[in-house]
Amino acid sequence: MNIIHILFGIVLILLVLIQTYNSVKAESHRQELQQICDFLQSRKDTMDSLLSRFDGILGDMASDNERNTVLKNHATELDKLVKELRYEQSCLESGNRSMKSKQKRLLTIKGKLINETNEIKEKIRQRKNTIAQLEIRIDSLKRIKAGLDIEIDNSLGNEMDCLSEPVSGLNIPPSIKSILDSQGITCIGELSSLDRDYLQGISGIGTISIDRIDAALQEKGTYLGMDAVKVNGRWYRIEEEQTSEQSQESTQEQTTE
């Protein structure tokens, strides 16, 4: 009995041990399964998070693609604009070169015209001087002829004593008298035979001074531009009417001859 009991007890112990082992093993399996489940759940959460981030990245990429498309369109328009600007710049540079070339030609032509104008002005000035000298010469010859005519026939001129008076006796400023004296104009006859243009060409004598000279001469019974001639130290006023009559008489005498 004891052996049977012992064996039965051993069997029971073995069964308890087996059952305990199985329980422990099952519990271990459950723990492992729980751990696996927890791990899988964690992985699932991680995947969900990754998927969410991936969706966000896809959205950002789509938005970036739209912006890239817009930027590409803007870049294309800018390229066209740059090409147009470069073309316009090329046209402007070409026009600028053409304008510079024309400007150089115009400057050359301008220089030639200025030189030609200066040459023409110089020729005109020389001719004016020549004409003025001829006029002075003609006037001098006329006076010589008038003096000869008066010397032959005193009726062709009226002697004027005031013409022999010195310029210093005129009612004009001393500075003007000094200028006239420096020009060799010492008597009223010499001054009266001059015209306004001649006096205005003398340095230091202006329009106001000429008016004063003319007024002073009129006080003496003479004036600027008078036809006066000096014959044998005496001054005569040439009578134009008598000179004309004399010319007519000379013409008639030549016709009669």
Image (spheres, helix red, strand yellow):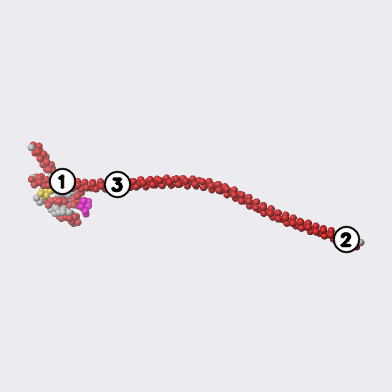
Q: Nearer the viewer, mark 1 or mark 2?
A: 2
Q: Nearer the viewer, mark 2 or mark 3?
A: 2
Q: Which residue is mark 1?
A: 138
Q: Which residue is mark 2?
A: 7
Where residue 128 is drawn, which disc sits there? none
Disc 3 secondary structure class: helix
Q: Give me the C-alpha separation between circle 2 and circle 3.
A: 148 Å
Q: Give me the C-alpha separation between circle 1 and circle 3.
A: 38 Å
Disc 2 secondary structure class: helix
Earlier sequence position, callout 1 versus callout 2: 2
Q: Give me the C-alpha separation between circle 1 and circle 2.
A: 184 Å
Left/right placement of residue 61 relative to residue 130 reads right
Where residue 112 is drawn, which disc sits there? 3
In the rendered image, residue 110 lying in the magenta stretch gets the answer: no
Earlier sequence position, callout 2 versus callout 3: 2
Disc 3 crowd, CA 10 A, few/some/many (<14, 14-19, 20+) = few
Q: Quadrant of the N terminus?
A: bottom right
Q: Residue at x 11, y 39 (%)?
A: 251
Amino acid type for the residue under numbered disc 2: Leu
Earlier sequence position, callout 1 versus callout 3: 3
Picture mark count: 3
Span highlighted in magenta in the image: 201-207
Instruction: Give the x, y percent position of residue 197.
Output: 20, 49
